[in-house]
Image (tube, rainbow, N blue to C red):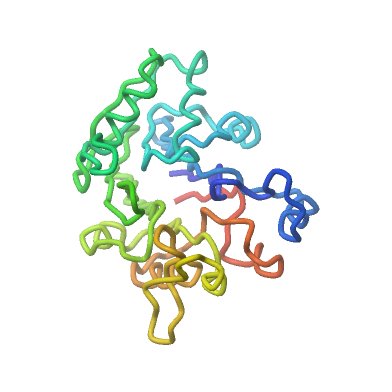
Amino acid sequence: MRVTLLGTGDTTGTPTVGCDCDTCEAARERDVERTRFSVHVENERTDESLLIDFSPDFRSQFLRDEVPLPDAAVITHIHFDHLDGLGNVFRVLDSLEVYAADETDPETGKSVAETIRDDYHYLEPLTVVPTTPLETVRTCGLDVTLVPVDHPPLVCYGLVVEDPVTGAKLSITGDTSYEVPAASRDVLADADLLLADAIVPASLCDHHPIGGRHEDAEGTPRTFGTKHMTREGALAMAEKLDADRTRLVHLAHFYPVEEAFAEPLAVDGETYVL
């Protein structure tokens, strides 16, 4: 299983358009970037590829990293930075199965699968496959399980990708607060590689209108506001899940420059063979 981090940034990415903060300037100087979130998983046994989330930066990501076009995809939730690249399949792919949760979201009155089917009804190559969370499906020769997480106000899912032959396991928290349900944590546990949402360091919670949540024993917030884990929260989650290796993703340009490129914060283009 070859895992390529196509996009490791948050909604605006790093560098952010029009921003001259120290972190964005350092990214330009280092010639690194964090585009909007997406992960490419290649099954080298079957010569098939799975794409997790369709970043708006789809075109530039695939040209930059020269990974194979996907044979199937998973969409974790309907925020634009995880979904709006889906239009790129037009005249690029002949067919694509897209797996998405079948649970109705009280906020929208639709499931993620229904929203994708309605919004992208004009894409003939697209086949939406409604998928029940915590039930494993097989695609591209890999076992994929969506797991509910906490990203209010919308439903959102992390996921696990496992190779049934080699036992290799990739876990992705998805966009989430620290309040990941116990059943989901059980599925995410014991991964060879964990990709964990860590939008900002906990020190920046002072700048959020509602501060931080889910403090540890020392009072350090593990959630920034309501929607995303802090760096400290993501590392605590990784320890709880007993991951062999952890990379922090969905990173904002608000990280202070002296912390923005330190381990284990990921940048685009990293590749891992599990």
Relative depth, front residue between 208 and 122: 208
Please provide percent x and percent y for residue 102: 22, 36
Looking at the image, residue 143 lies above or below residue 193: above
**For residue 149, side relative to residue 255 (left or right):** left
> For this rendering, which residue is in front, 231 or 42?
231
Residue furthest to the right: 29
Numbered-mark total? 0
**Image height check: is 97 above or below 241?**
above
State the image quarter where residue 1 is shown: top left
> Which residue is depicted at the point 43% across and 14% down?
94
The extreme front residue here reads 209
* Image location (x, y in percent) of residue 202: 52, 72
Find residue 87 and report its horizontal and vertical position in percent: 48, 23
Residue 167 percent across, percent down from the top left: 32, 51
Left or right: 169, with 19 as reference point: left
Q: Residue at x 52, y 66 (%)?
A: 208
In the rendered image of this protein, does residue 92 appear above or below residue 242?
above
The quarter of the picture where residue 213 lies is bottom left
Q: Nearer the viewer, residue 258 or 210?
A: 210
Instruction: State the residue at coordinates (77%, 55%).
Output: 25
Is residue 85 shown above or below 207? above
**Residue ranking furthest to the bottom:** 218
